Image (cartoon, helix red, strand yellow):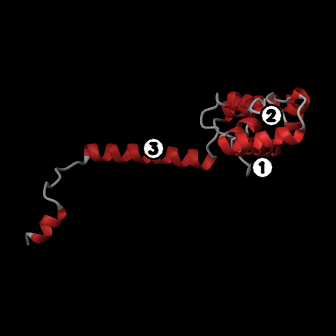
Amino acid sequence: MYRKGLSRGQIADFTGAAPATVGYHLRLARERDPGLQNEHETAARKPAVTGQGRERLGQLAAFVQEVGRYPSRNSDDGAERTLAGWLQRRRREAAAGTLTPAYLQALAGLPGWQGSPRAVADEARWQDRLTALAAYLATNSRPIDSKPWSAKIHSR
């Protein structure tokens, strides 16, 4: 019952046991199973996406589709800053493991939503530079000397 999100008091009411007795047994169970507390907290959270949350998800999806990037907290547009703040809070919740499964599932449709905008830009820049380096090496390659550099120094 605790694993399903019921509180100590709810379990006591349901079973007819004293809350202190339920608390004692829950403490023992948490000592034996360290993941029990996390499962309880996950199950106890409100699983549904609120009406405002659905609206924000729609705004975020439309923004990403229209603009081709995630909203910025440094934008001159107040609505974009607000949306960026909302997304930042969802990212923090996801990193902490407290984001409700409904939000997690809804946001999963947006590629790279958990990464910071800077990390996404850095990865894109890295891929561009790697591609340019590979192209350069393909056109300007020369045979590599098979001797290790230390052998060259000692052979002099």
Looking at numbered disc 2 in the image, what kind of residue is underneath it?
Ala
Depth check: give the residue in front, 62 or 20: 20
Looking at numbered disc 3 in the image, what kind of residue is underneath it?
Gln
Q: Quadrant of the N terminus?
A: top right
Q: Is the Cβ of the residue at disc 3 closer than 8 Å to that at disc 1?
A: no
Residue beneath the point at 85% across and 36% down:
7
Q: Quadrant of the C terminus?
A: bottom left
**Observer able to see residue 137:** yes
**Observer able to see residue 34:** no
Q: Which residue is mark 2?
A: 44
Q: Is the Cβ of the residue at disc 2 closer than 8 Å to that at disc 1?
A: no
Q: Residues within 10 Å of mark 2 (few under 14, many from 20)?
A: some
Q: Is residue 14 left or right of residue 85?
A: right
Q: Nearer the viewer, mark 2 or mark 1?
A: 2
User: Separation of disc 2 and disc 1 at Cα?
Assistant: 39 Å
Give x and y (percent) for residue 70: 67, 40
Residue beneath the point at 90% across and 37% down:
18
Q: Is residue 18 left or right of residue 111?
A: right
Q: Is residue 3 left or right of residue 154?
A: right
Q: Which residue is mark 1?
A: 76
Between discs 2 and 1, the one toward the N terminus: 2
Q: Secondary structure at mark 3?
A: helix
Q: Which residue is mark 3?
A: 127
User: Separation of disc 3 and disc 2 at Cα?
Assistant: 42 Å
Q: Quadrant of residue 107?
A: top right
The tally of labels here is: 3
In the displayed structure, 128 sits above or below 150; it is above
Q: Secondary structure at mark 1?
A: loop
Give x and y (percent) for residue 5: 79, 32
Between discs 3 and 2, the one toward the N terminus: 2
